[in-house]
Image (cartoon, rainbow, N blue to C red):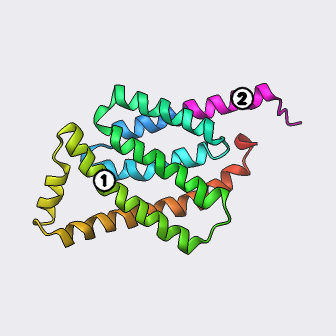
Amino acid sequence: MEKNNTPTRLLTRKITMAAMTIAVSLLVSSVFRNTSSILSAIIVPIILSIFLSSFTIKEYTFVSFTLLFLTLILITTQTVFMSLYILHGQTLIFLFLKSKPNKRMHYFYYLILVSLSLFIGILLTELIFNIPLHLFMMNLAKNNYLIYAAIILFEGLLISSFHVFLILRVHKSLVNSRYFQ
């Protein structure tokens, strides 16, 4: 079967990928909330980075704003974290798919980014939506800032490890499949 990569077919494929990415990201963020939101933090950036890796920065930005707008309408309290998931997805593309990876150094940068964004996301969600995530985390840490930082760092380690493992393994197999040709 001969490949038909006409501009119309490529545009149709990109629109389909963008729509699927938005739908699945919203579904995952709707289902995995509250205590299971770490699953959303793992899954959504992987979905974004794998399915949108062939997009230009302009196309990725357009899909990102559409996703943020729909998140704001449908699951308002997840807006802060969705914006961070979008940042994670773009960072995964840049560090591990588009550049020659210096795996250890890029992983370290990504771990710091994820950990800081988790902390910022917790604070902003409490500030904007009056959801006491920071208070919950402080109670969990018994009001000890070192334990709080260790919990955030552990979550960042867990999330970033899954991201890097999956982006390197899954993307390679999907690029070779007929769906990405």
**Residue beneath disc 1:** 120
At 33% from the left and 55% from the top, the residue drawn is 118
Label ID, residue 88: none
Instruction: Tell me how far mark 2 sits from mark 1, CA to CA.
Output: 36 Å
Query: x, y (%) of residue 15?
Result: 63, 29
Element carrying mark 1: helix
* Callout 2–callout 1 Cβ contact below 8 Å: no
Element carrying mark 2: helix
Label 2 CA crowd tier, 10 Å (few <14, some 14–19, many 20+): few
How many numbered callouts?
A: 2
**Residue beneath disc 2:** 11
**As displayed, is residue 7 above or below residue 44?**
above
Label 1 CA crowd tier, 10 Å (few <14, some 14–19, many 20+): some
**As displayed, is residue 89 above or below residue 153?**
above
Q: Nearer the viewer, mark 2 or mark 1?
A: 1
Q: Relative to residue 164, is residue 148 drawn left or right? A: left
Query: x, y (%) of residue 91?
Result: 53, 54
At 60% from the left and 43% from the top, the residue drawn is 51
At 59% from the left and 53% from the top, the residue drawn is 93
Quadrant (top left, top right, bottom left, bottom right) of the C terminus:
top right
Task: Tell me the chief SS of the magenta region.
Answer: helix
Q: Quadrant of residue 74?
A: top left
Q: Relative to residue 158, is residue 104 drawn left or right? A: right
Q: Amino acid at mark 2?
A: Leu
Q: Amino acid at mark 1?
A: Ile
Q: Quadrant of residue 115?
A: bottom left
Extent of the magenta region: 1-19
Quadrant (top left, top right, bottom left, bottom right) of the N terminus:
top right
